[in-house]
Amino acid sequence: MKFTFRHILSSFFLAFLFIFVANSVMGQTLTPTPTEEQENKDDDEKDKQSNLEDIQKKISEYEKKVTELQNEAKSLSSQIQIVDSQISLAELRIQETEEKLDNLQKDIDITEDKIYNLEGNLEGISKALLNRIVGSYKYGEVEPWEVLFTSKNIEDFFTRIKYLKIVQHYDQKNMLEAEQSKVSYANQQDILVEKQEEAEALHDQLDSYNQQLETERAAKDHLLAETRGSEVVYQGLLAEARAEYASIQGIIAGRGTEVKVGSVSEGDRIASIIQGASCNSSGTHLHFIVSSGGSSRNPLSYLSSISHVNYTGGDPFNPSGSWRWPIAETIQYNQGYGETWAVRNTWVGSVYRFHDGIDIGTNGSQTVRAVKDGALYQGSYAGSGGCRLRYVRVAHDEGGYDTFYLHVNY
């Protein structure tokens, strides 16, 4: 059978028509029908989100309740309600964080599965591409015009064109899949790192909330033990704390009545701690203050390291200076400096928000000694109820510091 120019043109037209139709069909994207598994997964996600929103709503309600209670008149019952609400708040925050962690862990598992599958896809595609590269190297690429002139007849031509197009499409598809798999793999790796970092932060937050819950429960136990459940005892403690705080502010401001005794050296005896209750104090302790320019300073920044027992509930004990301590070790550390655990978690916070010194005690000698050389002053301040709060002050030779020692005899 002879080929005329007309036959050749017809063949080309048919070939291009076939290629156009094939591309149109293969280029179509089908919209997948949602599976039952996907619908169930979406329902689970909605339930999780709804549960989390319920917890967050309760957290907001308890935060509002705590604020309202704190603004009410102070009584033992209201203070207990505040502590109970703070306990419930901590429990809800723990529940919220655990819920977030659970959801996040599921996301991490899904992401790790995706990475595993992508690794398999990349490996398979890489092998296929490698085989094609080897085949192309051996046999070379076939051009369409070569197919035309090497075909036996029109049927053979269409068959060869068909398979050539399939091979070219297969190569393009593999290369596109390889590129998409690489991008997806990198994206999933980034997502995994972000989710793992988020999970680590949530674990830290969970530890913090658990510690807070323990603190709140300890605060309630401390309140009930200290007041013995009595409103009269509670109001008495509040009155004593207010009186002591007012006296301390007056003493630091220089409004106490003082008499200069003379010079003292580091380690010299300057007083002794009063045993039991005294003016504006409910029990045995030394209130130690470091002051400069009429303002208090953190005593732990000046005192040296020493053995101690921490009874504060969580105030840091980190002495970093070189001064000797005013009392013998082992130190009983009862309240720290600044916004202390007691300020944040007990009725003390209704009296003051900042502790100007440290409260300490000892099982050893009750003798109080000068922490550095200086001039000794014996003083007192008019406390509530007509009593006078006794203290001593040492004006130190170096640095312009004053140290105060309250609730002492001299």
Image (cartoon, rainbow, N blue to C red):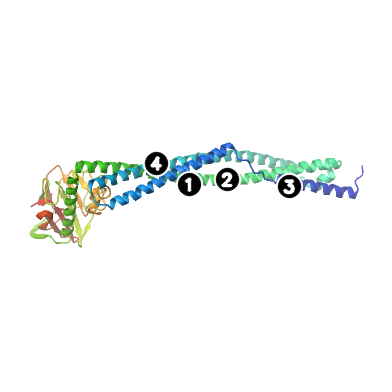
Of the two numbered discs 3 and 1 in the rendering, the one whose residue sits closer to the viewer: 3
Q: Secondary structure at mark 2?
A: helix
Q: Residues within 10 Å of mark 3 (few under 14, many from 20)?
A: few
Q: Is residue 284 left or right of residue 209?
A: left
Mark closer to the chain start, 3 or 1: 3
Q: Secondary structure at mark 1?
A: helix
Mark closer to the chain start, 1 or 4: 4
Label 3 and label 1: CA atoms lie apart by 40 Å
- Residue 299 position in % (x across, y down): 21, 53
Confirm or deny contact between disc 1 and disc 4 (CB under 8 A): no
Q: Is residue 313 left or right of residue 252?
A: right
Q: Which mark is residue 95?
A: 4
Of the two numbered discs 2 and 3 in the rendering, the one whose residue sits closer to the viewer: 3
The amino acid at mark 2 is Ser
- Residue 152 position in % (x across, y down): 86, 41
- Residue 81 position in % (x across, y down): 28, 45
Q: Which residue is mark 2?
A: 184
Mark closer to the chain start, 1 or 2: 2
Quarter of the image holding residue 54?
A: top left
Label 1 and label 2: CA atoms lie apart by 15 Å
Q: Secondary structure at mark 3?
A: helix
Mark closer to the chain start, 2 or 4: 4
Label 1 and label 4: CA atoms lie apart by 22 Å
Confirm or deny contact between disc 1 and disc 2 (CB under 8 A): no
Mark closer to the chain start, 2 or 3: 3
Q: Residues within 10 Å of mark 4 (few under 14, many from 20)?
A: some
Q: Which mark is residue 24?
A: 3
Q: Which residue is mark 1?
A: 194
The amino acid at mark 1 is Glu
